[in-house]
Amino acid sequence: MQFDGLHAVADYAALYTSLRQSAFVDFLRERLGTFDVRCDEDNRAVVFTSDGAGSEGHEEVTAVRSRASLVAVVEPSAIVWGWAHPCGDTSGPASRLREAGARLGIDDFTSPRVLLPPNPSRDRADDPGNRVIEIIAAAAVGSTGMSPYCTVRLEGDDRGVFLLDGITLPEPTFADFATKMPKVMGSLAVNDHRVAIHGMAARRGWHISWRTGTDGGRSPICDVTDGRSVAHVNFDRRGRPVDYLCELADQS
């Protein structure tokens, strides 16, 4: 089991979600430096607090607070969707994942509790829970249009995945996409990188076209443009990106 059903929704939004998350981390570090995160369940909020808060020279706590919607709780052996969790909301944003599952026939979204496979990662030997969280978050962002997200340690080894509301971030620019894509794509939690790039272009309203490579089409090439700059991505026969070429217009 490799979560193909979740990937069917998550892959399309994965690259966009990753770039939004990078901007969110930059946003927090600019304001807080290093920070901690905690969940305020009573007020359905998440609070990011500077590690330096409360130390000598700080008269008040420096924090960023956001309304938060529970998407899922990742337990050591299972995913419990927010719409089915006692701390969640049956009609909140997490319910849109259930609706997407019903519409697309994806049982993993409509079952309240989904067992985790021993190792859902095809390519990486790192903590499989981190990859599951990235897949859940991308599926949530793609289904709801809300972002960014955050992960909060709950009781025991459980981790909550929350969509945040009220954090204003700039949308990823074409320069962000073109310059960060090579590094991001190497670790992106997707089954199909081509879908991730296509989804990013569609989300931002950029034009994307596909053409055959030199081996008769087994290794496709995609060209993405915002009308001024162009990014070319070469894929191997398994649909993995292997080469990038960007032509960025003057940003001044």
Image: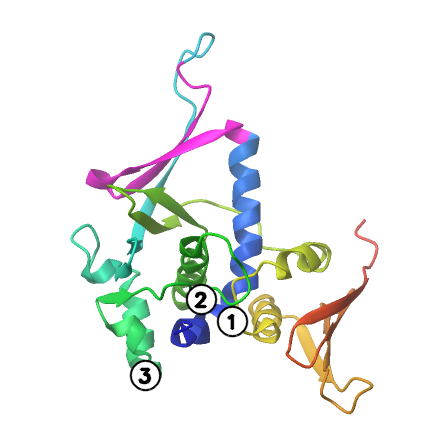
Label 2 amino acid?
Gly
Neighbours of disc 1 within 10 Å: few (<14), some (14-19), many (20+)? many
Q: Position of residue 142 (x, y in %)?
A: 44, 66
Q: Residue at x 28, y 47 (%)?
A: 158
Quick one: quadrant of the N terminus? Answer: bottom left
Q: Which residue is mark 2?
A: 142
Q: Residue at x 45, y 44 (%)?
A: 167
The answer to which of marks 2 and 1 sits earlier in the sequence is: 1
Neighbours of disc 2 within 10 Å: few (<14), some (14-19), many (20+)? many
Label 3 amino acid?
Gly
Q: Which residue is mark 1?
A: 12
Q: Can I make out residue 228 in this image?
A: no
Report the Cα–Cα distance between label 3 and label 2: 17 Å
* Segment colored magenta: 31-54
Report the Cα–Cα distance between label 1 and label 3: 17 Å
The answer to which of marks 1 and 3 sits earlier in the sequence is: 1
